[in-house]
């Protein structure tokens, strides 16, 4: 991001942001922290659970994200959304029961990653929509990416450096790591733009097709065959996601309600202004008499 900031005008929005310590610790640092925790927990879960089961648990991501956005006042809570969320959760519960290699530690680790990801998306949406810290997508990434980098570096040195084998790095290949880094960078840019344009819940819903692809890939390449019960549970979750996508946008309705409240405020202000004008006119007439 610093290279883009110095060589292009894509991140010029950073000059208009008054980055104070209060803004940094209240809005920017939490996004970077949750981003880092999401990466750490989600990667750690692969040590305990199968790929297909992890993707089924990640189906809870949109549910957690929706709850987080409601908690921060970014969307309005609606009964239809609640019922759809219950259906999605029920599907995930069914798939969890069908897991042969179930691990409570892995389940809790993945759950922590899902919660951290939901908080990250909600806080990122707040960062780009709040009047106090309104930023464009690339500017927000410019500010919170270094926080995530520092936390990941500290955790990596503390937890993985003692067992790190440099020979494994060269066995995989430098080009493979470089390619993965470039793809991850492009993915982060795409994510902040989607959150800025459509909202964090929509971005979370975009992960469902990826989950299906990974389940199919794990079956084809890793020999992991989910049970019939897992297929049924995952199907219920996907059906709930499809229904949710057809519901009126909670974010859009939240914006409409906000505009309506502002319009009422403006109408009240106009009435008060007219009343003051009439009162001043009456005072002037009294003085003239």
Image (tube, grey):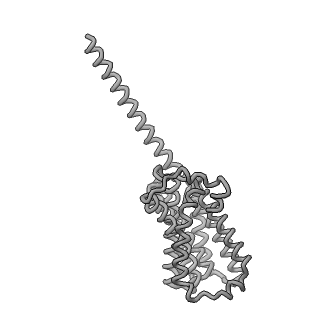
Residue at x 37% of width, y 26% of height: 274
Residue at x 58% of width, y 69% of height: 236
Rendered-image quadrant of the N terminus: bottom right
Q: Is residue 49 visible?
A: yes
Task: Say if 77 sits above or below 179 in the image.
Answer: above
Which residue is the extreme one toward the top? 289
The residue lying toward the viewer, choosing from 213 and 15, is 15
Rendered-image quadrant of the C terminus: top left
Residue at x 28% of width, y 19% of height: 283
Residue 112, position as x, y percentages in the image:
49, 74
* Left or right: residue 208 compared with residue 24: right
Residue 209, position as x, y percentages in the image:
65, 67
Residue 266, position as x, y percentages in the image:
42, 35
Task: Say if 214 sits above or below 285 in the image.
Answer: below
Residue at x 33% of width, y 22% of height: 278
Task: Say if 217 sits above or below 165 in the image.
Answer: above
Which residue is the extreme one toward the front? 6
The residue lying toward the viewer, choosing from 214 and 151, is 151
Residue 137, position as x, y percentages in the image:
58, 56
Question: Number of marks in the image?
Answer: 0
Q: Is residue 78 visible?
A: no
* Left or right: residue 282 compared with residue 115: left
* Left or right: residue 246 compared with residue 73: right
Which quarter of the figure has residue 102?
Answer: bottom right
Task: Say if 124 sits above or below 92 in the image.
Answer: above
């Amino acid at each position: 991001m610093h290279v883009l900031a110095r060589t292009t005008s894509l991140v010029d929005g950073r000059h208009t942001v008054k980055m104070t310590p209060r803004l940094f610790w209240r809005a920017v640092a939490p996004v970077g922290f949750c981003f880092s925790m999401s990466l750490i927990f989600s990667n750690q879960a692969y040590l305990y659970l199968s790929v297909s089961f992890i993707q089924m648990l990640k189906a809870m991501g949109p549910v957690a994200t929706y709850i987080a956005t409601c908690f921060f006042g970014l969307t309005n809570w609606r009964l239809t959304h609640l019922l759809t969320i219950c259906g999605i959760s029920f599907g995930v519960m069914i798939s969890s029961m069908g897991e042969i290699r179930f691990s409570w530690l892995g389940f809790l680790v993945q759950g922590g990653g899902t919660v951290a990801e939901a908080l990250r998306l909600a806080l990122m949406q707040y960062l780009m929509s709040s009047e106090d810290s309104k930023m464009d997508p690339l500017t927000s990434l410019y500010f919170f990416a270094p926080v995530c980098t520092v936390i990941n570096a500290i955790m990596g040195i503390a937890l993985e450096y003692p067992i790190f084998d440099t020979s494994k790095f060269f066995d995989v290949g430098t080009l493979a790591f470089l390619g993965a880094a470039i793809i991850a960078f492009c993915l982060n840019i795409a994510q902040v733009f989607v959150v800025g344009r459509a909202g964090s819940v929509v971005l979370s819903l975009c992960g469902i097709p990826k989950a299906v692809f990974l389940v199919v890939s794990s079956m084809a390449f890793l020999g992991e065959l989910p049970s019939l019960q897992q297929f049924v549970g995952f199907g219920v979750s996907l059906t709930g996601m499809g229904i949710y996508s057809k519901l009126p946008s909670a974010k859009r309705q939240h914006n409409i309600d906000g505009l309506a409240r502002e319009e009422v405020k403006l109408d009240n202000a106009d009435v008060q202004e007219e009343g003051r004008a009439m009162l001043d006119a009456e005072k002037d007439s009294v003085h003239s008499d």
